[in-house]
Amino acid sequence: MTGIAGLWAVIPAGGSGTRLWPISRRHSPKFLHDLTGSGQSLLRATWDRLQPLVEDRILVVTGVAHEEAVRRQLPMLGYDAVIGEPSPRDSMPAIGLAAAILERRDPEAVLGSFAADHVITEPENFRRAVAEAVVLARRGELVTIGIEPTEPATGFGYIRLGGRLDVVGAPSAHRVDEFVEKPDLQTATRYVECGEYRWNAGMFVVGATTLLELLAQNHPEMVDHLRIIAGDPLRMRDLWPSLQKIAIDHAVAEPAAAAGRVAVVPASLGWDDVGDFASVTRLVGVSDDLPGITAIGPADDIISIDSTATVASSGRLVALIGVEDLVVIDTQDALLITRPERAQEVKRVVEVLTAQGRIELT
């Protein structure tokens, strides 16, 4: 497979994955872990998926605390392909800085931003969707890939499809009418049943300069600072803290959609954002050797008698007898026990620990 000429992959590798505590921590976030039983971390799987499309045109933007770990997992990347953020400022400054760097390298560059911690099980559909998105991006569009919903999920934002676009090379494309925040279950059910909505997975494909121009409409000072940093990385220290903490959806995508500047390529990708332990359970599946048990990692230290559970062991024996539908995550310094339907609430534990000042456990 040959790459898509002029396309650069930007991999934002941030966040602490608090819903996957205690496996995911501030010092070792979820993208550095193998949570699906694939034998490689989510970050490495993301690189494997993107490399055939972009060859060596990849930038990873991550926190300075994770820069060394990223380089260890992706040793094939050049030194200047990993950009360390001094502090988390959400997705817009991270992606915007990558755009400013690429603009200097190649004024015609198209970037595709794809999170480091997502799973895609239909890579050929992904390749086709990205290829269509690049065609649209070269016409000046901000393009997102809209995921075909498989259920009325309340944990994702949604994209409302507008009219179909008649663009050669992008037969699936639609205009985006609007981006919608995470809905309640009744609203999400209506979205799925009417067929006019797709999940917003935060995947964007756009010309580097186009993205900065769209950002400058509402955040001109941020663009100025990002371009200065791109030209003089030593300015990162004093300018980065002044950048507004804001997601690309709010900074660019939503206002651009209101102005009719956003296109969407709908696609069925087998996508999952690996957002909590219920998601991990779906992805990993039941162990062949332990009926009823989904093992995150090796199953050698798990004994199950008449039980069903998702279990991770840190090397200490975990024995289950006559329990049903549990999540049991055992690490060296913390033990989590919950149920899949409460998995989204795991982040509350991190909030409590933070309030107690027990930062070393987060």
Image (cartoon, rainbow, N blue to C red):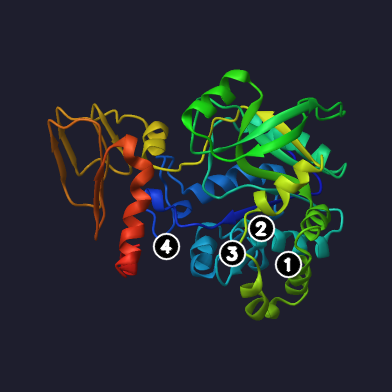
Query: Alpha-carbon neighbours of circle 3 within 10 Å: few (<14), some, or many (≥20)?
Result: some
Instruction: Tell me which corner region of the image, top left, top right, bottom left or bottom right, holds residue 237.
Output: bottom right
For marks 1 and 2, give the CA distance.
10 Å
Labels 1 and 2: the sequence-earlier one: 2
Q: Position of residue 332 (x, y in %)?
A: 24, 59
Labels 1 and 4: the sequence-earlier one: 4
In the rendered structure, which amino acid carries the disc numbered 4? Answer: Arg
In the rendered structure, which amino acid carries the disc numbered 1? Answer: Met
Q: Position of residue 354 (x, y in %)?
A: 35, 65
Q: Quadrant of the C terminus?
A: bottom left
Labels 4 and 2: the sequence-earlier one: 4
In the rendered structure, which amino acid carries the disc numbered 3? Answer: Arg
On the image, numbered disc 4 is attached to which residue? 26
In the rendered structure, which amino acid carries the disc numbered 2? Answer: Met
Residue 22 seen in this snapshot: no
CB of mark 3 within 8 Å of CB of mark 1? no
Question: From the viewer's perspective, is 58 left or right of 213?
Answer: left
Q: Which mark is residue 92?
A: 2
* Picture layout, residue 18 above or below residue 278: below
* Picture layout, residue 353 above or below residue 20: below
On the image, numbered disc 3 is attached to which residue? 89
* Picture layout, residue 30 above or below residue 288: below
For marks 3 and 2, give the CA distance.
8 Å
Q: Determine the secondary structure under disc 1.
A: helix
On the image, numbered disc 1 is attached to which residue? 222
